[in-house]
Image: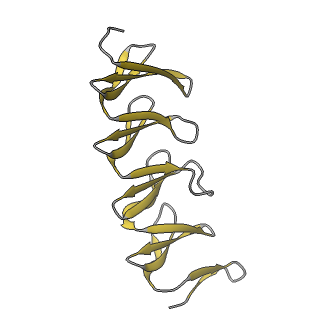
Amino acid sequence: YPCQYQNIRLDNICGKLTLFTQQKGLWGLTDFRAGKELLPTNFSEMEAFGPNNEIIKTIKDEKVGLYTNDGILIFPCEYSSIEHGTVKAYPSAFQLKKGNTIGLYDGDGVAIIPIDTYSSFSPINQFFLVCQNGLYGIYAPYDKEIVSCKYNHSIRYSASQKCFIVAN
């Protein structure tokens, strides 16, 4: 490689030799074997990420995004944080935070719980207890809100009755 980079770092990401390149303080991504630039040097930080370090986590203008190790966009750099492994029932899912809202997405970028609506969520049986503006409801993963966020108090699931019990 020509001497155009300040720093280079070679990583094995899912069996693929990937070259992280730094130029003028910004990071990019190059396919080591093909010598092909996958992502230009536009990011202040870049690292292997995900359940098996198979995803590239990028930071640009203090916002976080995700790419595949082939440089294909999963989530643009518009989130304040992205974490994985936070929900036991979905160990490979990514939790995204944007402003005061939070969402949960699978590895393909499909919404389990969409962002831009809820301030928090927690698993309750095979559903999620969600909070919006201090009020609680129930969300079915990959689907929709099944109990609207209009309850002040707790919602619990009764396994014996196979239903939600709402106190308002």
Residue name at image x 51 percent, y 63 percent = 141
Residue drawn at x 54%, y 90% as measured from the top left: 167
**Where 47 falls versus 61 (above or below)?**
above
Residue 74 lies, with reference to residue 1, above or below; the image says below
Judging from the image, the colouring scheme is secondary structure
Coordinates of residue 161 in the picture (x, y in percent) = 69, 83
Give the vertical position of 151 relative to 76 (above or below). below
Q: Position of residue 72 (x, y in %)?
A: 38, 34
Instruction: Tell me how many marks there are.
Output: 0
- In front: 152, or 139? 152
Q: Give the image quarter of residue 71.
A: top left
Q: Residue furthest top?
A: 2
Q: Position of residue 55 (x, y in %)?
A: 48, 36
Residue 92 as seen in the image, left or right of residue 21 = right
Residue 75 appears in the picture as rendered:
no
**Which residue is at 52% across, 34% downward?**
54
The reply to whether residue 98 is in sight is: yes
Horizontal placement of 7 versus 90: left or right?
Answer: left
Residue visible at 60% across and 51% down? 91
Compared with 103, 33 (above or below) is above
* The N terminus lies in quadrant: top left
Residue located farthest toward the right when viewing the structure as drawn: 160
Query: Would you identify the image quadrant in which residue 97 lies?
Result: bottom left
**Percent x, y of residue 135:** 43, 80
